[in-house]
Image (tube, coloured by chain):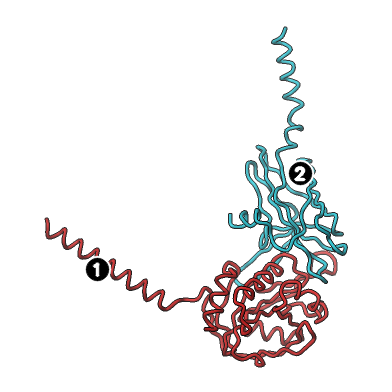
Amino acid sequence: MNMKKALLVLAVLLFAAPPAWSGGEISVKDPWVRRNPPGASVTAAYMVIENRGRAADELLEIGCSCSASASLHITETREDSMAMKKVASIEVPPGDSVVLSPGGYHVMLEGLSGDMGETVTLEFKFRSGERISVTAPVVLNPPAASRRGHHH
Amino acid sequence: MKRHYWLLTALALIALVWVAVLGFIGTDKGSFHGDEYRRPAFDFSLTDHRNRTFSLSGHPGKVILLNFGFTNCPDVCPTTLGMLGEVLDLVEDERAMALFITVDPERDTAAKLGAYIPFFHDGIIGLTGPQQEIKRVNDACGTFYSKEQETQGSDYMVVHSPAVYLIGPGGEVMLRYPKEKLDPRKIAGDVKRLLM
């Protein structure tokens, strides 16, 4: 009887758990937003996105409380020229993380609404259905943690 | 057997001395951190962020770091400007200058640069002016820029060089720092050496 109950609980857990577990699979770490210089209507946000799950996930959309629009970009540097390219999404492989840092992937924030204050809220939407909201400091220089990330 | 041993030791010693000599010559020559990039001296005249005329020939004997960019560039341009500010703080010499030349003069007026540039460092000079003059500076540095329309909307981006160029006291482009060499301490080292 007890065994049967235990099995039932296990079965329920197995079916019910995956959506609950996925809640912790994707996380956003060390977010920061570059304080926009006066007169600049654009700036960028950076962070590390970690996927502890067993399946790949994809960052589809980002929103910021500070700007009219937020889009995913990558800075591509060739021998002597540099350009920013819009990307539709950023894939985060399972058991891996993707670093958004100056000179690489970044979130371009356009149409800034005046003074950004000390912090802004960033909202992330992933293909898995995951939605994450984080508070990011608005700073001049990358915080120490993301500088470390920058050097790999 | 013993003779072979001595011969090997002697050879090893010779190799060691040779390496040491080469190493000494190498450091004595003291190569720069920046890539050597000698191009003929040139001049240009643009408007600075305080709305005054700036001519390269008006600043002889100075070591000038030059970077191209535009204020609507959110990622790399502010990073490089911050780096140039750090170099000026490390060098602390009036004979060292940093210039930011816009590649988007349509939007980057002197007034706009006046609000933008001092945010990074008081010593950085923002420059704008006619397209042909900005193009001439790019040519002199052996680089280029081009406007690129975004797929949607009226917004555009300007593709340009991420490098920093060092103009020596004689007005010639001497060194080039590609993206991966934008290290403020090492660039400051080059500037200090040239000002010695």
In the rendered image, the vertical position of residue B125 relative to residue A89, given as above or below:
below
Chain B rendering hue:
red
As drawn, the label of residue B14 is 1
Going by the image, does B190 lie left or right of A130? left
* Percent x, y of residue B127: 74, 82
In the rendered image, the vertical position of residue B110 relative to residue A67, given as above or below:
below
Q: Residue furthest top?
A: A1
The N terminus of chain B sits in image quarter: bottom left
* Percent x, y of residue A85: 72, 62
Q: What residue does disc 2 label?
A: A127
Nearer to us in this view, B194 or A84 = B194
Q: The residue marked by circle 2 belongs to what chain?
A: A
Secondary structure at numbered mark 2? loop
* Residue at 68% across, 69% down: B82
Colour cyan, chain: A
Going by the image, does B30 lie left or right of A107? left
* Residue at 59% across, 57% down: A151
| Mark in the foreground, 1 or 2 | 1
Q: The residue marked by circle 1 belongs to what chain?
A: B
Nearer to us in this view, A33 or A50 = A33
Going by the image, does B168 lie left or right of B119? left
